[in-house]
Image: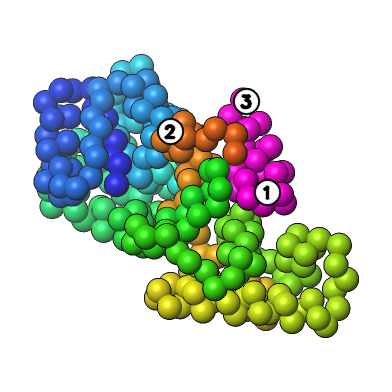
Amino acid sequence: MIILAIDDERRALSTLTQAIESAVPDATVAGYSTAGEAIGFAKENKVDVAFLDIQMPEMNGLLLAMNLKEVDPKINIIFVTGHSQYAIDAMELHPSGYVMKPATKEKVECELENLRYPVVNESSKRMRVQTFGNFEVFVDGTPLKFVSARAKELFAYLIDRRGTSATPVEIAAVLWEDKPYDKSLRNQIQAAISEMMKTLKEHGLGEIINKSWNQISVDRTRISCDYYDMLDMVSSAVNAYCGEYMANYSWAEMTAAALSSKINM
């Protein structure tokens, strides 16, 4: 978890960062005394929570919150102030929480337990998907071996769709290209789905796939993926991208082009 702490008063900032570090010892806490520094950090890192002092010179906490939400609409904003009269104005921005000074471990813990956008602990994600270069899947750090190449390609296609559902017709159009959508092809698709599910279930990861009548998708919240991190502009993923995306699949070329265009903007 990455947490921002911003207060223009050095003593108050020290108190706030210490309270956060006591509440979540494993978190990365970045403390700043100016709004500009905080915005710069948020642009380079995926910030989960920002504790903002409301009353600051140049750019107050309310305006800073709006700027941070432009960087990441799902950042959790928690306002910190010694003046309760700011509460109404602050609440209009739909923050995650509100802390009255002085900040304490207990106050911070209370707010973190009730975040508007819950933070998923990356270390709890057993699956890591590599899309830069060739497509590979790792479970608990070990390469995942699928029952068949087609089952692996199907999973790659679902990763590419980022949680959007795919129908058998859509799967056929991409993975089997110009083959007629007949009974034989429908059976091949169902076989690929069954093989993919068999591999995932053998590793206790069947819940990563969402299935409903005639539709299938991945639950991207359960997966650590360089592609998803890049779309969220996580600096490590952006820097790792060298122009190749799922290079072993020709149908992934459109996404590769879109990612290269995003980098060059």
- Horizontal arrangement in the rendering, residue 97 relative to residue 184 (left or right): left
Disc 2 target residue: 235
Residue 22 spot, x, y in % from top left: 11, 46
The mark that comes first in sequence, 1 or 3, is 1
Residue 88 spot, x, y in % from top left: 36, 43
How many numbered circles are shown? 3
Helix, strand or loop at label 3? It is loop
Residue 31 spot, x, y in % from top left: 23, 30
For the record, the magenta segment spans: 245-265
Circle 1 Cα neighbour tier, 10 Å, few/some/many (<14 / 14–19 / ≥20): some
Disc 1 target residue: 252
Circles 2 and 1, Cβ within 8 Å, touching? The answer is no
Magenta region includes residue 196: no
The mark that comes first in sequence, 2 or 1, is 2
User: Which is in the foreground here, disc 1 or disc 3?
Assistant: 1
Residue at the (66%, 44%) spot, across then down: 255
Disc 3 target residue: 265
Compared to residue 70, the image places residue 94 above or below, namely: below
Circles 1 and 3, Cβ within 8 Å, touching? The answer is no
